[in-house]
Image (tube, rainbow, N blue to C red):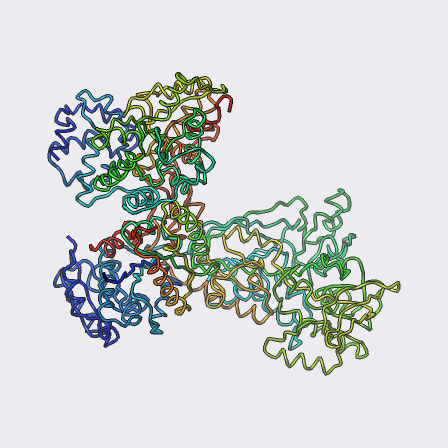
Amino acid sequence: MKQIIRNTKAYYCVECGKCTGSCPVARGNEFFSPRLIVERALSGMKQDIEGDRELWACLTCEACSKKCPSTVKYSEFIRGMRKMAFDSGFTSRCSQGGLLHSIQRIHSIKDLVQDRLDWAKDLKTSKKGEVLYFTGCLPYFENLFSAFVSPIEIAKSTVKILNFAGIVPAILQNERCCGHDLLWTGDSETFQKLARLNTEMIKESGASRVVTSCPECLRTLKLDYADLLESTGIEIMHISELISSLMKNNGIKFNRSGIMTYHDPCRLGRHLGIYDAPRDVIKSMGELVEMGNHMAESSCCGVSAWATCESMSKQMQVNRLIEAKSTGSDTLITSCPKCLIHLKCAVHNQIPVEKEKVDIRIEDLAVAAGKALAGD
Amino acid sequence: MTNIGIYICHCGTNIAGMIDVEELARKAAKLKDVSVVKDYRYLCSDPGQDLIKEDIRSMDLDRVVVAACSPRMHESTYRKVLSEAGINPFLLEIANIREQASWVHSEKEKTTEKAFDLVRIAVAKVKKDESLESLPADVIQRVLVIGAGIAGIQTSLDIANIGYEVVLVEKEQSIGGRMSQLGKTFPTLDCSACILTPRMVEVSTNPKIRLHTYSEVEEISGFIGNFHAKIRKKSRGLNPDLCTGCGECTARCPTKVPGEYDEGMGKRKAIYTLFPQAVPNVPVIDRANCVYITKGKCGICKKVCPAGAIDYELGDEIVEEEVGAVVVASGFDPFDPTSKEELGYGRYKNVITGLQLERLLHTAGPTKGEVIRPSDGAVPKRIAFVQCVGSRDEHANKYCSRVCCMHAIKNALLIKEHHPDAEIFIYYIDIRAFGKGYEEFYKRTQEHGIKFMRGRVAEIFEENNGNVVVRADDTLLGMVMENEVDMAVLSVGMVPRSDSAKIQKLLGIATGSDGFFMEAHAKLRPVETLVDGVFLAGTAQGPKDIPDTVAQAKGAASSALGVISHKVLELSPLISEVDERLCRGCGDCKDICEYGAIELITLDSRNAARINPALCKGCGACTVACCNGSIKLRNFTDTATFAMLEAVLGGEA
Amino acid sequence: MTEFDPRIIAFCCNWCSYVGADLAGTSRLQYPHNVRIIRTMCSGQVFPSYILKALELGADGVMIAGCHIGDCHYVSGNKKAEERFRMLLGIMKTLGLDARRIRLEWISASEGVKFANTIKEFAREIKELGPRNGGKE
């Protein structure tokens, strides 16, 4: 625990409470306080932290980190605490009864041979290539959530855009989960297995550039696989960054229509600082009207790592949609499959406000861009 | 800290013969948190039970695993052991090493290995079990009976005679139901009125029965032991408390319309009672046909009423009743044969239904018991009965309506007794004389010369003289026969009452594919519904004759008494529970619940699910529907299941 | 090399299939020892994640057994199980795991023979398929 405190600069905590004050979870969950977890850690209350269910409530959205005057790396601190708790036999309460986590752990079986490329049938892809599209868990999300959203469309649109730009991306027939969710719920052992399996395949593909449509994959590959990919010089980028560069360098254009607002995913925004690329793309497709909370101030979609969904989450989602609707936009664009799923989930059944207040189309950036390709 | 005791039963050689009990005990003793492992020849015996009790007391055990026969055999026995020794009875798990190990395998080593796995699973589970207490719920010791035909009457009388209050609600203006429409009843030929009216009078005079006639239940909320009903008492257009039932108003009313009670065979007035022995003997003004109400003229009834009871403006009244159980005895409707166009009902005057014939045969009916045919009032000499109209028919109802065979045979015999020279044909495909004394009765009619023609009537058409021709393939002769008769009687089957969908929704009970209310189990729970505290009686549950209806009514009475004779009910604690803090209020659980046990409540500015413990049956469907794990089924949680899987697959416990 | 001895988990509903399994016992019907039964209240109470968790932990086959359609003690729990099972089959396909590793069976309280035969058949089939992470799939 001391190591974690040291690595995340938690020692510097001055107990000012800025974190708890700016925490979206603490706003609705009186039992959760980022500050108190740090304090307990500093007082050496290991067991107390491990057994606390609030340890799993943090969204690791980094809203606090951006404000912390002592620059404590809070999300990493939480991640460390969770690993510690996990190793002592405590686990998070998972959405879908832990179904996704099981899928992800099954992915760590070395000999697994998946059948996950159905969606790519009508698109141009290859086994090896200069650009690798890292699909992430989209085929599985499609299995689970097709009742109210079609996540696989994101993958299709991504490849469609790449094909349009003359790129035939490599896709991995046996790509594994990047391990993000397990890493952030304390299971670093399985994460390591997944990371090794993925990096091997990425290296074998001969790619010099890996594109993801999921900011969590992006963060994981870029930061958490860093030591495994370090020497390779492989560039990891988000689809919004690639489209943005295709616009500049290859002259790709979009048909303009409508007014859009943009929801920054935590991983893409606060974690990686990618704010402009998605906005460049949106501005070329239509008019962008920002919500009050945007860029570093953006609100979280309310769930992280399939482990933090609770009443608070729905409130955050509904509030976010109200905010989006009130911009007068007709579409809320996001660039994270999970944000898309969570925001759509919030309104697909009962909501505590009038339907008109949240009645806005929600679309992934790649899907919107795929539809708007000029000359397609 | 957890302190588990494991007890392994030899069950003589039933278990010990195929499982190495010593080896099993040795392995089990090494499991984490296990303080003691013992084995015994017959654990369910008194000394066996004492062994467990003794250890719980002396070693402070807080959880117990019994490795023995199926939990379906002795789970309750061992729960009691725990209770008596002072720990919560739900902190028990049974490893089923007899039915699911020693009895089904034949390699001792492998079977012992499996038994150990089953013990590990049980240990993992028992660690996750929680202490549970049954929930007490106060019972309102009254019963609501919906429908006052013979079923509702019998149920009400049985309950009232034991000494409990009954609220009896009847839609029509008098109690008596379909049975009161009948003349004589098979197979004994006693007159329906003679056996029914004394019961009706009993209902009206029993101080324990609160009767609401010309009334309908509009709303029911609550759950077993605690139902709240809203009943609309429709306005009769007169004050029933003042009315003496003298009948002056009916006698002087100038308006005549076809009477529904007579199935259209006779006429009634616009202010009328259903039949002379009606209970209560208070008329109703038919607002659709009363000239004073429709045109503002007349007003004779008001003028002649000696009691001054008539009040045209009188509105409906809503009464509210609290009850602990509900019996649905809403009865049946006769099948409307108009849709069977080939039979000509509605087009040919001399094609009538069995119930219409019944009214003609009734001594208090429109013809005072004389059978005449509608077209010209002549006495029909040749009559055909057409069986299975609307029954056993894929185009109408698949089921057999059970009573039509006997009904036709009975009426044929009655006609034959009046007019020995009458010729009667019964067109049938099978005669189903299933009841006590029915087959004998059927034989008697055959002796009277009634002709049974085996063949389903294909078509009926009319001759100029009003006679109808019945065409059918006589399947015994293999010839298509056309038979000109004076009148044809369609033996129509029973269908669910037209308003049964409303009642179904009111109570949340289920209907089968036939549209009748569904019992909880076709054989073993024929009067219960899937809603606790709601029972069925009579033809509301399916076609029945009078004896079966009465038998079921008595069953419903005893079942309802089984609920309301308790002051307090113990509700099972093995139900679902919502973590309101986690709940997203999406309502998926509410949508999936078959029992209406979940409602969405508002907490601050958000929704959350809440479970009614009296309605929840503990099926756990909601727990799976919940996307974020806010609902758990007590002692059947996902964490417990994962622990069991880890124990058996991961090799831990 | 020792012979492959499959590990099978069966989730049996309290009202039908568990009783069917008991009946197989009281009738002394022999079936392979590979199966471990976990009692659930209803097949509709089985989370899809239970099946994947079992596979994750190394089970070679998983069965959900409930009352026949129309006979569910809780009206329609088995229909819910059926819907969820379809979703699971989709996931199995994507994972590249053989769909025969998971089963949904309707076994009534009176079908001890069916229970024993189902386990026999299932164990045989899983033996043919080999271990869950045996490489081929």
| Residue drawn at x 75%, y 65% as measured from the top left | B458
| Residue drawn at x 42%, y 36% as measured from the top left | A152
Q: Is residue B138 left or right of residue B460?
A: left
A238 or B570, which is in the foreground? A238
Residue A316 visible, this orientation: no
Q: Position of residue B480 (x, y in %)?
A: 78, 71
Residue B589 visible, this orientation: yes
Eyeballing the image, is B413 above or below A77? below
Dividing the picture into quarters, in which one does residue B251 lie? bottom right
Residue that lies at the very extreme toward the right in this rendered image: B464
Dividing the picture into quarters, in which one does residue B58 lie? bottom left
Eyeballing the image, is C49 above or below B448? above
Q: How many marks?
A: 0
Q: Is residue A67 left or right of residue A356?
A: left
Eyeballing the image, is B275 above or below A113? below
B199 or B393, which is in the foreground? B393
Q: Position of residue C99 (x, y in %)?
A: 39, 52
Q: Quadrant of the N terminus of chain A?
A: top left
Q: Position of residue A87 (x, y in %)?
A: 18, 43
| Residue drawn at x 49%, y 64% as measured from the top left | B527
Dividing the picture into quarters, in which one does residue B635 lie? bottom left
Q: Is residue B122 left or right of residue B468?
A: left
A345 or B327, which is in the foreground? A345
Q: Position of residue B470 (x, y in %)?
A: 79, 68
